[in-house]
Image (spheres, helix red, strand yellow):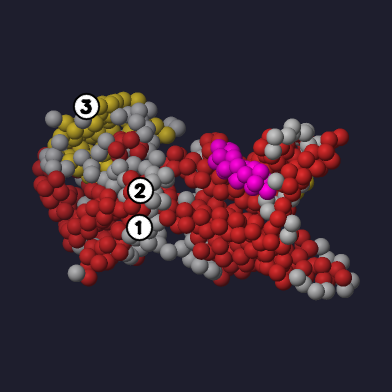
Amino acid sequence: MSLLTLEHVTKSFGNLRAVHDVSLEIPKGKIIGLIGPNGSGKSTLLNVISALNPADSGRILFEGEEISKRSTDEIFGLGLVRSFQDPSLFFKMTVLDNSLLPVKQQQGEKPWRAPFHHLWRKQEAAAALESSRLLEQLLIRKHYDALASDLSGGQMKLLELGRSLMGNPKLLLLDEPTAGVAPKLAYTIFENIAQMRENLGLTFLIVEHRLEILFDFVDSLYVMHMGQVLTEGSPAEISANSAVREIYFGE
Amino acid sequence: MTIDFLSTGIALLTFFGISALMALSLNLEYGVAGIPNFGKALFVSVGAYTAALTYTYLLPLLAGKTPIYPCGANLTDALQLRTGIIREAMGIGLLNFLLTLVIAAVIGGLIGYLASYPALRLKEEWYLALVLLVGSEIVRILVRGYEPIICAHNGISGLSQPFVALGNPKLASFLFALVILALVALVFIFSERLIHSPYGRLLKAMRENERVAQSLGKRITRTRAQIMVIGSAIAAVSGVLFVVNLGFASANDYVVALTLDVWVMVVIGGIGNNRGALLGAFIITVLDRVTAIAAIQLDQIGFQLEFTYIRFILFGLIILLMLRYRPQGLLPEKPLTTEAHSLLKTQAQK
C-alpha cells in the first residue's frame, strides 16, 4: 500500500511552474530517491508536500487521507517529517535541545504547565534517554551539551537526521542528507537510514545529488526535470535510461 | 544641598522594580521568543489607564460611595473622594490596588492578544516592530484627546500609594517598594522556570528559525500570541505600579522614549538573560536618577542644560558602545534549557 500519494500536483511562483502535474507513489517501508538537475523542482516538491508552499492544485494523500489543505505543523503531527537542504539546525541551541524539540505531546510545551517542572520532568527525562540512545547511535552523543553550531558539517547532518526521528515519523522527506559531507560519512549516513528502515519500518523519500551512494540504497527512483516527473524506475533502469542520461549527465 | 539617603534609596528601589518588570517582559518577548515589541509603552500605558479607571470607579464602589466623573467641573470632588478613601480606609485602598493589578494584567493580556493578531501575521518581524511602535503612539494620542479615561491631556492625579493611610510617608513608600520587589521576584521566578522548560526551548527555536520550528510541528502563531499575552500582562502590571508610585496618570509618560529605555535595559543586560534584564534595569534606573540630580545641581550653579537631553545622549552612547564592543550584553544568555542536560551528564559519568 502506498503511504504517500501525489496526484497531479502543481505549484507555480508567478509565471514559473516549479512543479507541474506531478504524480507519484511512495510505498510503505521503501527508500525512494528523487533526483534531477538543479532547479528541476525537487526541493519545491518537498515544500509542497510539507505545506511550506501549499500546492496550487492536485491532491496529496498520506495514509489515504487528503493532506493538501493541512498546515505544516499538522502534517508533522501526522508523521510526515522533512529535513532541509541547508543545515537547518537551531545553531544557538544545544545538540540535546535540538533533538528534543520535535518530541510530540510535550506537557512542558504548554505555557500554563511549563513553570511547574514536576508536571513534565518525567516525560522530559524519558525523552532525554531516548535522545541519548539515538545520539549514541549517530556517534554524536558526547557533544550533547555543545551548541549545534560547534558541530562539523557531517555531525550537523547526523543531528538533523536524529532530530527528524525524535518526532516519531512514519515518512521522512530528506533534502540532500549528505550535502557537504565527506564521502565516508555520507556512506555512514545512508547506512543509518537503511538501518532505520530495517529496525523502525520507516519510509524515506530522499533528494540526493550523490547518485553513486544513493543508487546503493534506494528501492526505486523518480527523476524530475523542469518541474515534471520524467520517469521512474529501479536504479538499474534509471541508469540505463537514455533520456535521464541526457538531461542528467549531458550525454 | 543635603540628600535624604533613605528616601533616595527607597525611590531608587521603586523605580528599579518597575523598570525591572518592563525589562523582564521585553526580555521574554524579544530576548527569548524573538518578538520585537516596540510598543512596550502601549502595554505599560494599559496598566496606567486601568488604574485611572479603577481609582475613579471601583474604589468608591468598594467603599460604598457613589463614583464621580473625574474631569471638568467635578475634578476636585472626584480627587477628594479618591484620596479621602485611600487615606482613611487602608483595607479598601489595598483591595482596590490589588484588584487593579489583576484587572490590568487581564486587560493587558487581552490587548496583547489583539495586537498579536494582525501583527504576527506580518511576514517580516520588523514590520511588527513598526506596527507596534506606531500603534503605541496612536493610542497615546487618542487617549490624550479622549476625556473619559484620564481627562485627556490633563491627566488624573490622586492615585495614591496603598499604604499612605499609615500616616508615615517613608514607611508607606518603603512598604510599597517591598510590594513591587516581591512582584519582580515573582515574575523573575516565573519567567526563569518558563525559559528552563520545553516551552522555553520552543520559544528559542521559534526565535532562531520559525520555518524549521513549524516543520517540526510547532504552532508558531499561537505560541507568539501566548507570549504577547504574558508579556503584555506583565507590562500592564508595571504600568499600574508606575502611576500609583507617581500618584498621577498622564498620557505623556507613554511616549516612544519609554519603549526605548526598556530596550536599552535589555540590550545592556544581555538579550535572552533575565539576570541581564534586571542588571540593565538597575543600571538605567541609577543613571536616570544620577542624571536627574546632576541636571538639577548643574542648573543651580548656572548651567542651562535640559535633563532629558543629557539622558538621551548618555543612553544613545551606551547603546552604541554596547553594540560595538559587547553585543551579547553584560550577562550573555546561557544556552542550556532543561534539566535533561544534567541527566545526560550524570549518565555519562556513570
State the separation of the CA atoms marked 2 and 1: 10 Å
Contact check, label 3 and label 1, Cβ < 8 Å: no
Task: Give the residue type that dot 1 points to.
Answer: Thr
Q: In the displayed structure, would residue A249 be above or below residue B4?
A: above
Label 2 neighbour load within 10 Å: few <14, some 14-19, many 20+ = many
Horizontal side, residue B77 vs residue A130: left or right? right
Task: Give the residue type that dot 3 points to.
Answer: Gly
Q: Which residue is mark 2?
A: A108
Secondary structure state at the residue bearing disc 2: helix
Question: Looking at the magenta stretch, what is its main secondary structure?
Answer: helix
Magenta run includes residue B348: no
Q: Residue at x 70, y 46 (%)?
A: B89
User: Which numbered tag is attached to residue A64?
Assistant: 3
Q: Are marks 2 and 1 on the same chain?
A: no
Magenta run includes residue B97: yes
The magenta stretch is B90-111
Q: In the displayed structure, would residue B344 be above or below residue A11?
A: below
Q: Circle 1 marks a residue in which chain?
A: B
Quadrant of the image for the C terminus of chain B?
bottom left
The front one of B302 and A173 is: B302
Evaluate whether residue A42 shows in this view.
no
Q: Toward which corner of the image does residue A106 lie, by quadrant?
A: top left
* Residue farthest right in this picture: B302
Horizontal side, residue A63 vs residue A149: left or right? left
Q: In the displayed structure, would residue B66 be above or below residue B337?
A: above
Secondary structure state at the residue bearing disc 1: loop
Q: Residue at x 51, y 55 (%)?
A: B186
Q: Nearer the viewer, mark 3 or mark 1?
A: 1
Label 1 neighbour load within 10 Å: few <14, some 14-19, many 20+ = many
Contact check, label 2 and label 3, Cβ < 8 Å: no
